[in-house]
Amino acid sequence: MNNLFLISVGGIVGIVIALVVVLLIVFVISIYNKLVVLRNRVRNGWSQIDVQLKRRFDLIPNLVETAKGYANLEKGIFEEFAKARGLYAQAAQAGNVEGMAQANQSLGGTLSRLLMVQEQYPELKANTNFQDLMAQLKDTEDKISFNRQFYNDTVLGYNNKIELFPSNIIANIFRFQAAQFFEVKDEAQREAPKVKF
């Protein structure tokens, strides 16, 4: 009888231990999957910004070419644009969010100079091709702003998840890295260039 009691108590303890192990495994898998989903949302958020930034880089040469017909543009605008585009391409290839943000800021300065030229030439402002390109640029700027906000919100959620207990343990085990925010560091660049018609 005593042996039967010990076997049943041992069986119950074994079942409890097995249940705890199964629950722990389910818990780890659940946290790991949440971290993967958040990391993928961060990547998707960045890819949305990247698409709009590339679109903006593609629109600018068309604006410059249209403006060249009306104004004597400085060589510096072309050089600054080429430099910003090169910096962006290098940073994008390396996956450096901060570098891409800096290239974006550099492009913003170049774009501001181009817009000042537009103000000096009323016939340029009246050109329908230029107006269409400016409307596309404004739409792109709005999308960049919206996507940057979405990306930064997603990064915040992801970074919180990898830093808060107990998910930080799983994040450290599987080497999840904190994501970078897409920040504007230069006060002059905090606002999108004003696109006027």
Image (cartoon, rainbow, N blue to C red):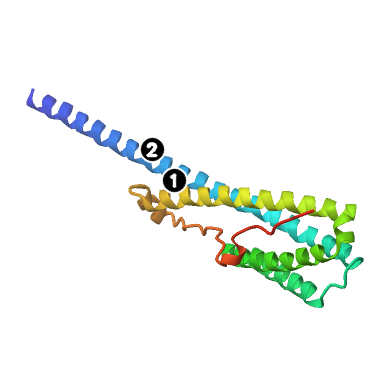
- Residue 42 to residue 26: above or below: below
* Side (left or right) of 167 relative to 94: left
Q: Secondary structure at mark 1?
A: helix
Q: Report which residue position mark 1 lands on.
A: 32
Measured as percent of width and height from the top left, residue 57 is found at 75, 61
Q: Residues within 10 Å of mark 2 (few under 14, many from 20)?
A: few
**Towards the viewer: 40 or 126:** 126
Camera-near label (1 vs 2) is: 1
Residue 134: which quarter of the image? bottom right
* Side (left or right) of 45 relative to 197: left
* Side (left or right) of 84 relative to 8: right
Measured as percent of width and height from the top left, residue 144 is found at 65, 52
Residue type (three-letter) at the residue carrying disc 1? Tyr
Is residue 93 in view from this perspective? no
**Towards the viewer: 93 or 58:** 58
Which residue extends farthest right? Answer: 69
* Side (left or right) of 112 relative to 42: right
Q: Residue at x 66, y 64 (%)?
A: 104
Q: Residue at x 11, y 25 (%)?
A: 5
Q: Residue at x 64, y 65 (%)?
A: 105
Q: Specify the quadrant that holds the N terminus.
A: top left
Which residue extends farthest left? Answer: 2
Residue type (three-letter) at the residue carrying disc 2? Val
Residue 65: which quarter of the image? bottom right
Measured as percent of width and height from the top left, residue 49 is found at 65, 53
Q: Residue at x 77, y 76 (%)?
A: 76
Q: Report which residue position mark 2 lands on.
A: 26
Q: Secondary structure at mark 2?
A: helix
Name the N-terminal-most of marks 1 and 2.
2
